[in-house]
Image (cartoon, helix red, strand yellow):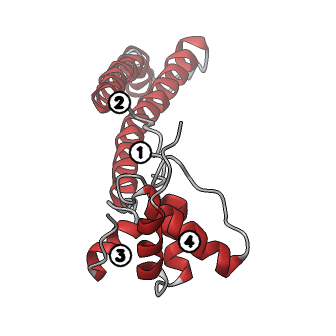
């Protein structure tokens, strides 16, 4: 059950608000809350807008529409940093595999050097599986080492970009325009 409006207060508000711009009154009507305006003040605004515009737009009951917060894509920054650290640590394991693969070629390389120096002109280079497997293993593990290091740095870079983007977002106004205008212009609504 709604309480009846005080017509005397409505007339008082209407006389006071009659000189206000239509744009301001429209903003106050659409987003002004009951904390800012009395029911009589809102009714006075509705009547003025009805006279000026012939139709009154719908009113937002929730008050000032606050823009939604951007989604928090990295809700746990520590977890992303931990993953970056894990990738960097795992990359060293692949680097060790690269070094061991290349180290397994040392006996074959010494054999070739011995054949060249002491083989009386005969040396045979054998490009067989004992040579190709360690070289391809070293190449693959070194490539993965570089890939994991790049992924670790990419995660940190993405965190920086996300943080800078959030810092650059404009902050929503702290007060609705109807309240800001009333405080600046000395207009009281109650």
Instruction: Give the mark nearer the N terminus: 1 vs 4.
Output: 4
Give the class, few, some or many, for how many residues have Cα within 10 Å of label 2's Cα (few <14, many ≥20). some
Asked if the residue at tag 1 contacts the one at tag 2, i.e. Cβ–Cβ closer than 8 Å, the answer is yes
Give the class, few, some or many, for how many residues have Cα within 10 Å of label 3's Cα (few <14, many ≥20). some
Instruction: Give the mark nearer the N terminus: 3 vs 1.
Output: 1
Residue at mark 1: 158
* Residue 18 left/right relative to 48: left
Instruction: Give the mark nearer the N terminus: 2 vs 4.
Output: 4
Check the picture and name the quadrant holding the C terminus: bottom left
Of 41 and 75, which appears nearest the observer?
41
Residue at mark 2: 80
Distance between the alpha carbons at the discs numbered 2 and 3: 45 Å
Query: SS of the residue at dot 4?
Result: helix
Residue at mark 3: 181
Instruction: Give the mark nearer the N terminus: 2 vs 1.
Output: 2
Q: In front: mark 3 or mark 1? A: 3
């Amino acid at each position: 059950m709604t309480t009846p409006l005080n017509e005397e207060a409505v007339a008082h508000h209407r006389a006071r608000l009659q000189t206000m711009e239509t744009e301001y009154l429209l903003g106050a009507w659409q987003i002004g809350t009951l904390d800012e305006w009395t029911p009589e003040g809102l009714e006075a605004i509705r009547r003025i807008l009805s006279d000026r515009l012939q139709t009154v737009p719908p009113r937002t009951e929730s008050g000032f529409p606050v823009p939604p917060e951007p989604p928090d894509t990295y809700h746990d920054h520590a977890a992303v940093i931990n993953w970056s650290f894990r990738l960097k640590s795992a990359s060293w394991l692949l680097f060790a595999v690269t070094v061991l693969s290349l180290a397994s070629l040392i006996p074959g390389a010494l054999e070739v050097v011995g054949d060249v120096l002491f083989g009386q002109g005969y040396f045979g280079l054998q490009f067989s599986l004992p040579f190709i497997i360690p070289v391809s293993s070293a190449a693959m593990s070194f490539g993965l080492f570089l890939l994991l290091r790049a992924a670790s740095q990419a995660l940190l870079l993405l965190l920086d970009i996300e943080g800078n983007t959030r810092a650059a977002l404009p902050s929503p106004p702290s007060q609705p325009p109807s309240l800001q205008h009333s405080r600046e212009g000395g207009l009281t609504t109650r």
